[in-house]
Amino acid sequence: MSYKTDYARVHGHGAAGEGVGHWWAQRVTSIALIPLMLLFIIPFGRALGGGYDAFVATYSNLWHALVAVLFIAATFAHLQQGLQVVIEDYVSGKAARTAALLVNTLLCWAIGAAGVLSVATILFSA
């Protein structure tokens, strides 16, 4: 029989202390994506029917390129955070979870970096 209180029994076995920061980061990116999506979709939609030259003309503008880069960065940061929560909740087994989290982080960073590099290439080559 143990005389420890409930708090004493679970003290030190809780979260790693990163839960609140992760929660806030998800909320901030989701709120930031609302205006960024609107600011990204309008010029993207206008350039959509015009082919390659229309995209180069659109994203040669510093403002449109900056919005596109911020939209891509926020989207893939939010995607990585959301998938991390799903993986942590539903993937059992330490090795499988670690591998899935690693692949998630690497793919989100790689695809996001490719998108940012694409916009930067258009901006600086035109």
Image: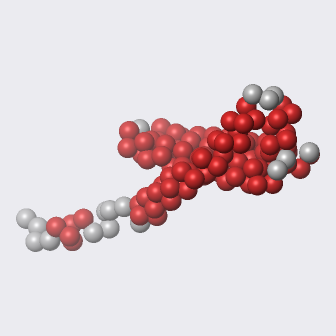
Task: Identify the colour scheme used.
Answer: secondary structure
Instruction: Please provide percent x and percent y for residue 38.
Output: 60, 47
Residue located at (54% from left, 51% from top): 34
Q: Quadrant of residue 19?
A: bottom left
92 left or right of 67?
left
Q: State the quadrant of the C terminus.
A: top right
Coordinates of residue 110 in the picture (x, y in percent): 69, 43
Taking the view exactly as shown, the residue that stands out farthest to the left is 1
Residue occupying image coordinates x 43% and y 58%: 23
Horizontal relation, residue 40 to residue 53: left or right: left
Whether 74 is drawn above or below 110: the answer is below
Q: Is residue 6 above or below residue 61?
A: below
Total count of labels: 0
Tell me what residue is drawn at x 54 percent, y 40 percent.
99
Q: Residue at x 38, y 39 (%)?
A: 90
Return the x and y of residue 113 as percentages of the image width and height: 72, 46
> Is residue 14 visible in the rendered structure shown here?
yes
Q: Position of residue 13 (x, y in %)?
A: 31, 62
Q: Is residue 77 visible?
A: no
- Picture quarter with the N terminus: bottom left
- Left/right of residue 78 with respect to residue 44 in the rendered view: left
